[in-house]
Amino acid sequence: MVSFSKLKVLLRLSCVAMAILATVAHSYAYYERGQARHAIATESESEKKPSYEDMFNESMNFFPADTPPIVREFLKDPDNDDLAKWVVKYFNQRTDTALRAGQRLSAIAGGSNLPPTAAMQHGNNIDMLNLQKLSEMRQNGFQAIYFFNRHCPACIRSKDTVRIISRFLPVREVDAMSENAEALFTRWRVARTPTMFFIRGGDAYKMVGEITPMSLHQFLQGVP
């Protein structure tokens, strides 16, 4: 027979045990709710942030707002010969228009001769002439090798123009920070970045310094 004093002890122990169980149950429920909120937040964050593949695909279809429609289509499909003929026709007509505009400006200025490059800048003609030349180089079997350093300011500024070049020519990129880069830099005698070689057969044409539409245009004038 259990005495009254023992019964009181058992009741107290039962109360303590129930309190502990209630605390544990409450803590577990709170933990579960926290995990659920974290999962929802993570899922929501993943939905908001596009994947690198999505960003890559979007970048491949990105063009400046002032890119002419015919040029935009050609950059998407440079192997389309019929489209290429229209692009060349477009380049030629825009070039003629720019040259006539330059002659007109020269006449208005009192007969002073404007540099040819100044006339060509009208209507983004430098970009158009670059695309035309790169298209011709692609047909003539040119390829390129590009030496750069990912931390080089001039290399960073050259990215857009290099991207355009790579749409026409096979471009092998060599980052100075990558493995085995030193051997390639030594083999090609590259002393500074950015440096790009345009190669056809046994001929190589070396361009050193920041690659902009204007500097590319000036350099390509010396490439047969």
Image (cartoon, rainbow, N blue to C red):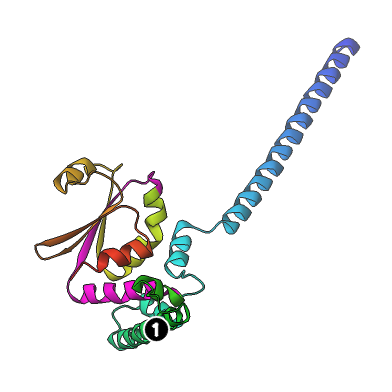
Corner quadrant of residue 82: bottom left
Residue 210: in sight, yes or no? yes
Q: How far from the left and from the top, in percent, is residue 75?
A: 37, 75
Whether residue 71 is situated above or below residue 207 in the rendered picture: below
Looking at the rendered structure, the kind of residue marked 1 is Arg
Q: Quadrant of the N terminus?
A: top right
Q: Please name the residue shown 34% across and 74% down the image.
A: 116
Q: How far from the left and from the top, in percent, is residue 52?
A: 46, 57
- Count of marks placed on residues: 1
Q: Please name the residue shown 86% across and 16% down the image.
A: 7
Corner quadrant of residue 128: bottom left
Q: Is residue 3 magenta?
A: no
Q: Please name the residue shown 47% across and 63% down the image.
A: 54
Task: Point out the residue furthest to the right here.
Answer: 4
Question: Closer to the camera, 50 or 198?
Answer: 198
Q: How far from the left and from the top, in percent, is residue 44?
A: 63, 55
Q: Please name the residue shown 84% across and 23% down the image.
A: 15
Whether residue 147 is situated above or below residue 88 in the rendered picture: above
Q: Which residue is mark 1?
A: 94
Per the image, label 1 sits on a secondary structure element best described as: helix
Q: Is residue 26 left or right of residue 36?
A: right
Q: Is residue 138 left or right of residue 98?
A: left
Question: Closer to the camera, 30 or 223?
Answer: 223
The stretch in magenta equals 124-153
Whether residue 11 is situated above or below residue 137 in the rendered picture: above
